[in-house]
Image (cartoon, helix red, strand yellow):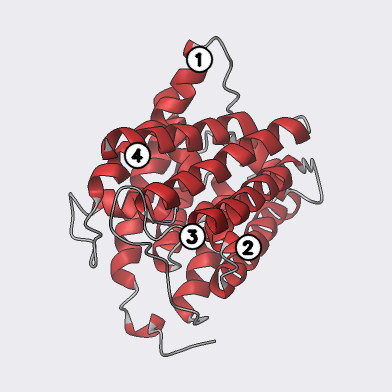
């Protein structure tokens, strides 16, 4: 969506960041015995405001987890680092994207972290199918938007 | 203590997203653009995270219970059903449009980009619809693939 912002290949930073994400997933399992899926954690917090069906009981750590995620870029900035971020500014497009991501992860019971990291680490058959499906759908979507529709 | 440890876990997760580049939609979209400005970095994020979790989970599961009490609660379903596949496909399309999955959308919040401020409320609305849509008859789990 919008102009293509070039990005640099960063294998080491990406690997290091990935290991941190994995460590967080291990912390959540060791401390709370749960999957660190962000869609699921968000679902649990949302259950405090609106009925979400089978809402999980332990909302305290989930809300704190989300606040921790929100604090992360601020911590990087406070430490004098930079946070590279280029968010598409096509607002109707972002509204549709948000709705699809919420609806899809709600229906499919997981996102990049729940199915991707945690599910594959558990060798869950459902998660391998989910990851294959959402990766394929995302790659096709980017191909259509960038190379067929021509930079919608 | 639970709250502090929950916050700490979220902070580590968020730092991982920021350091790895996963929190930057431009990097995500370039990762998905195999035919164009392909940036393979995010394969290293997924690889690093999954291998770390694979090893760490097995060490943790040797214990009898989580440190904060209760038991280990893992999804038990192994059914490849319609909500799983339809949901994953819808998620993929949305991810390909916006470059945000749920985690990075949260870490992006304090930077207040207009795209983030539109994406997040719609994400919450979608999650709410999705939680209720699972019981719709067209997505009835009996209709397995």
Q: CA distance from mark 4 to mark 1?
A: 22 Å
Residue beneath disc 4? B6
Q: CA distance from mark 3 to mark 1?
A: 36 Å
Q: Position of residue A65 (x, y in %)?
A: 36, 39
Quarter of the image where the N terminus of chain A is located: top right
Element type where label 4 sits in the image: helix
Looking at the picture, tell me which residue is in the foreground, A26 or B29: A26
Q: CA distance from mark 2 to mark 1?
A: 34 Å
Query: How would you rate the neighbour count of disc 3 (Cα within 10 Å): few for under 14, some for 14-19, many for 20 or more?
Result: some
Residue beneath disc 1? A77
Residue B46 visible somewhere in the drawing = yes
Q: Nearer the viewer, mark 2 or mark 3?
A: 3
Query: How would you rate the neighbour count of disc 2 (Cα within 10 Å): few for under 14, some for 14-19, many for 20 or more?
Result: many
Which of the two discs, 2 and 1, labels the residue nearer the N terminus?
1
* Circles 4 and 1: CB atoms closer than 8 Å: no
Residue beneath disc 2? A137
Residue beneath disc 3? B61
Q: CA distance from mark 4 to mark 3?
A: 19 Å
The disc label shown at residue B139, or none = none
Element type where label 3 sits in the image: loop
* Circles 4 and 2: CB atoms closer than 8 Å: no
Q: Is residue B114 left or right of residue A12?
A: left
Q: Nearer the viewer, mark 4 or mark 2?
A: 4
Which of the two discs, 4 and 3, labels the residue nearer the N terminus?
4
Q: Do the residues marked 2 and 3 share a common chain? A: no
Element type where label 1 sits in the image: helix
Q: Looking at the image, which residue is at 53% across and 74% down?
A: B85
Vertical relation: A136 (above or below) B108: below
Q: Nearer the viewer, mark 4 or mark 1?
A: 4
Looking at the picture, tell me which residue is in the foreground, B41 or B83: B41
Vertical relation: B128 (above or below) B15: below
Question: Furthest-top residue in view?
Answer: A80
């Amino acid at each position: 969506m919008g102009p293509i912002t070039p990005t640099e290949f960063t294998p080491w930073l990406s690997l290091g960041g990935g290991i941190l994400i994995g460590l967080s997933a291990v912390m959540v399992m060791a401390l709370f015995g749960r999957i660190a899926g962000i869609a699921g954690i968000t679902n649990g917090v949302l259950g405090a405001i609106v009925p979400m069906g089978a809402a999980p009981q332990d909302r305290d750590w989930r809300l704190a987890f989300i606040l921790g995620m929100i604090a992360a870029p601020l911590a990087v900035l406070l430490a004098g680092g930079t946070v590279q971020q280029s968010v598409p500014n096509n607002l109707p497009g972002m509204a549709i994207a948000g709705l699809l991501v919420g609806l899809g992860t709600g229906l499919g019971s997981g996102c990049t972290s729940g199915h991707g990291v945690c599910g594959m680490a558990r060798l869950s058959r459902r998660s391998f199918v989910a990851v294959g499906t959402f990766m394929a759908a995302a790659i096709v979507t980017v191909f259509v938007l960038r190379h067929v529709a021509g930079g919608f | 203590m639970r709250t502090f440890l929950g916050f700490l876990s979220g902070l580590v997760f968020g730092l991982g997203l920021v350091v790895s580049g996963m929190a930057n939609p431009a990097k995500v979209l370039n990762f998905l653009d195999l035919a164009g400005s392909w940036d393979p970095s995010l394969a290293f994020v997924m690889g690093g995270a999954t291998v770390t979790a694979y090893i760490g989970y097995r060490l943790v599961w040797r214990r009898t219970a989580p440190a904060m009490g209760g038991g280990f609660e893992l999804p038990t379903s192994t059914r490849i059903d319609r909500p799983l596949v339809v949901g994953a496909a819808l998620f993929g399309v949305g991810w390909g449009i916006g470059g945000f999955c749920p985690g990075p959308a949260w870490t992006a919040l304090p930077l207040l980009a207009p795209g983030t401020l539109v994406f997040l409320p719609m994400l919450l609305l979608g999650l709410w619809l999705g939680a209720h849509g699972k019981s719709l008859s067209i997505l009835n789990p009996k209709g397995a693939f």
